[in-house]
Image (spheres, grey):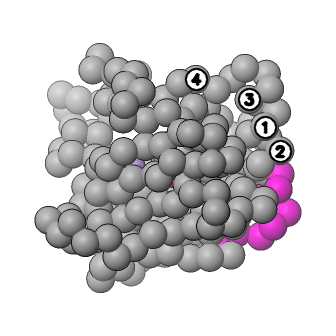
Amino acid sequence: MARHYAVMPGYFPTPLIRALRREALLRDARGEFQEAGIGRREDHQHDQRVRRDRTCWLNGSTLAQCRLQEELEQLRLAVNRELFLGLFDLEAHFAIYDPGAFYRRHLDAFRGNSGRVLSVVLYLNQNWNSDLGGRLRLWPKPHSRVVDTEVEPLGGTLVCFLSEHIPHEVLEAQAQRISIAGWFRCNNTTAERLDPPR
Ligand code: OGA
Ligand code: MN
């Protein structure tokens, strides 16, 4: 992670990706997805100019989610072992970008507020191709406007990046685009502040 990010095609087995996709579509059909917001809790806002995806939090209720959590737990342990990031827990949601949806350039964390350290995104799409847009664009050098990294949202690909350091955006998708975005957080608990709040 010298570049502060990694892209790993085919990281997850196809049956797991298929099961997670089915689950996302089922929960969407049940109306469990919500228009995504920006900011946390009291400053939470919906701004259609910034993002147009819909999201639904993972809750550990299915076998597929448990399998995914096991995989991500292995990743957490490996990253802590190799990179000493002190990753503590994970929050993650399904995200659906309907045709025309995007998420403008943003950071997933600002120093010291959310505890988010490492962002992970995995794609659940079945037959994606480059005509369908929806690429994830990363700016590993935040002050350079040169685009040098774009990732196709192919089913099974895992992308990781440092939440506070890598601005990124989701380009407009031309077909329904399904993913899971997650954030490994450090433990911010202090005497005055319990994180996460109860
Ligand atoms: C996010 C995000 C990227 C993607 O949800 O914060 O940046 O490729 N997602 O879906
Ligand atoms: Mn993001």
Q: Are marks 1 and 3 in contact (CB under 8 Å)?
A: yes
Q: Is residue 65 visible?
A: yes
Q: Are marks 3 and 4 in contact (CB under 8 Å)?
A: no
Ligand 1 near label 3 (Cβ, under 8 Å)?
no
Q: Mark 2 points at which residue?
A: 22
The x, y position of residue 169, in whole percent, is: 39, 53
Q: What stretch is highlighted in magenta?
A: 11-19
Residue at (70%, 55%) from the top-left corner? 124
Q: Nearer the viewer, residue 168 or 108?
A: 168
| Type of amino acid under label 2 | Arg
Residue at (57%, 31%) from the top-left corner? 54
Question: Separation of disc 2 and disc 4 at Cα?
Answer: 18 Å
Q: In this view, does 48 lie to the left or right of 191?
A: right
| Extreme residue toward the top, this view | 42
| Type of amino acid under label 1 | Leu
Whichever of labels 3 and 4 marks the residue nearer the N terminus, that label is 3
Q: Can residue 117 be seen in this view?
A: no
Q: How crowded is mark 4: few (under 14 residues within 10 Å), some or many (20 or more)?
A: some
| Type of amino acid under label 4 | Gln
Q: Mark 4 points at which residue?
A: 34
On whether residue 108 falls in the magenta region, the answer is no
Question: Separation of disc 1 and disc 4 at Cα?
Answer: 13 Å
The circle on residue 28 is: 3
Q: Do the residues labelled 2 and 3 touch (CB within 8 Å)?
A: no
